[in-house]
Amino acid sequence: MQLKSSATSSLAGCLAALILHVSCGGPSTPPPPPPALSITTATLPDWMATFAYTQTLQATGGVSPFAWSVSSGNLPHGLTLANSSSESVIITGTPDVAASITFTIQVTDGKSQTATQSYSIQIKSLVSPQLVPVQGQVAPGIIEIQGLSGGSFNPVYWQKDTLNWVPDVRVPMLAPQPGPFQNIYAPWPLEQASGWRLFYGGWDGTDTSNDRVYSVTTPDFLTFNNRVLVIDHGAFLHVNNGNVTQLSDGSMHMICTIAVDQTSNGKPAYFSSADGIVWNGTPEPYPAQLTDVVSIENDPLYPGYDYNGGNVLLRDNGGWTLYYSDGIYGGSGGAVYRATTTGSPPVFQSAGSSLATQHYSNDVKKLTVGGKDWYLMALYIERVATDPNPPSFSYSLSNDGVQFGPEQTLFGGADPQDQFLVTPAFVTRGTQILGVLYGGNPVDLLNPQDAIFARWLQKKVTIHDASGARQAILGAYGSDKQWLQIAAGTFQGTIAVYAEDGVTPLAAGPVSLRAGTAYQLVLGTNTATKRK
């Protein structure tokens, strides 16, 4: 037997030790440091002194257990920290005085890492709401409150997913014209100087069941005028699902969905007008042509897939972005895709997928808040009567318009007449999201009985009588008004007003009302700053 030298034996031992991941006397690799600890909530909203309030702070990184504390020992004015041994902590309580307060929150993890965050908050005293009588015809047993439109787009509210959507009392808001075929949906409200031009598609009392694109004007979504046919189906079986962008020069740019025949895959088509009257060189109604169909040259899936009802055109960063959806029936598993052009449509270049979903994108709005861009997408999913899940809309947010975040529920049907709802579109006025218009019917997605419904994003109002019973909300009447049912005669009670997120308090106080009267909501001056 040949014996190994001591050096050879030592080397062999080290090699074995390396294979077994044990030390053979050399320096050891230290374990990786724990993830850095931080507090992700950078700011806290102000609140009313007379309303109970909760706000969650979240820690990221670090290693449990966690311990939260306040640098001064305690929070001021009746506020406390709750649930202070987990990754999140809750600031809760009912402030006892109006004041400006500053405090520092500290969290320490199980590895003795520490993170701090300072906050400055204005605790506001109670604001007294006033309901000032104004002219208006209101039915007996009802009061109308005006001035309830939501404020400018607030991404904090939308991220909380608690928005106060109020159904319009008109069921539907806009019905088809009389005629052999009555089926309208796919609304698109385009803001104008004097109100809105509302585009929509379907069979508006027509003699044939070919989808076309129409429009009507409205100053307030309470009265409608100038009902006209804009795009006829022309060379196609159907033209529908239109959405329109208007540039500063007054020109309008429309994307629709076309279907060549009953068995064809839907595709987007593009139409433009310098004045909103002459489209593609022809006074409305313009008959759609094969040359209007959008091409996406570098998308190999585009020719063979169905992009029916989910096509949105957005003017962004000096160019055009097209969002196109293949949804549940498209063939690729479901996604909202993105294509762009710096020239003129209808020729686009594919820019990849923006959201993995079987929902169809029907609207994308770009809004800027505090110098930061927000893209808001509205989506719907096709469901039929045999589907166990009720139809609903969703929305998704993005800061670049390229990749969108997880979907959140928008709303579902509110009345037996709109249980099968489709094609949502946001109503905007400047930086405000006033509401959502959509098509719907009571029977099934494919049943040709659609009309146009409305859901309005409004301040939340609760009115209670002297016994504490809450009065019923009948619904919204347009974007700014709300109807509530009260007992006949004079009513004494209390009112509380919340922001359009449905939870942020704005005002509360006593109220005296008379049935059959319209009132303007005025958020008055602060009352005494000290609560008794």
Image (cartoon, helix red, strand yellow):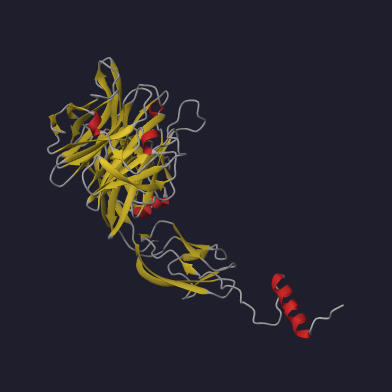
Above or below, 478 relative to 19: above
Taking the view exactly as shown, the residue that stands out farthest to the right is 1
- Image quadrant occupied by the N terminus: bottom right
Point 22% across, 28% down: residue: 288
Point 18% across, 37% down: residue: 272
Counting from the top left corner in percent of width and height, residue 515 is at 29, 34
Q: Is residue 20 left or right of residue 399?
A: right
Residue 486 in view: no
Residue 231 in view: yes
Exactly how many numbered labels are in the figure? 0
Point 50% across, 33% down: residue: 389
- Image quadrant occupied by the C terminus: bottom left
Res. 15 image quadrant: bottom right
Res. 97 image quadrant: bottom left
Counting from the top left corner in percent of width and height, residue 211 is at 28, 24
Above or below, 520 relative to 72: above
Counting from the top left corner in percent of width and height, residue 13 is at 75, 77
Res. 292 image quadrant: top left
Q: Nearer the viewer, residue 340 or 183?
A: 340
Q: Is residue 457 left or right of residue 90?
A: left
Above or below, 454 relative to 457: above
Above or below, 111 relative to 437: below
Counting from the top left corner in percent of width and height, residue 409 is at 43, 43
Taking the view exactly as shown, the residue that stands out farthest to the bottom is 6
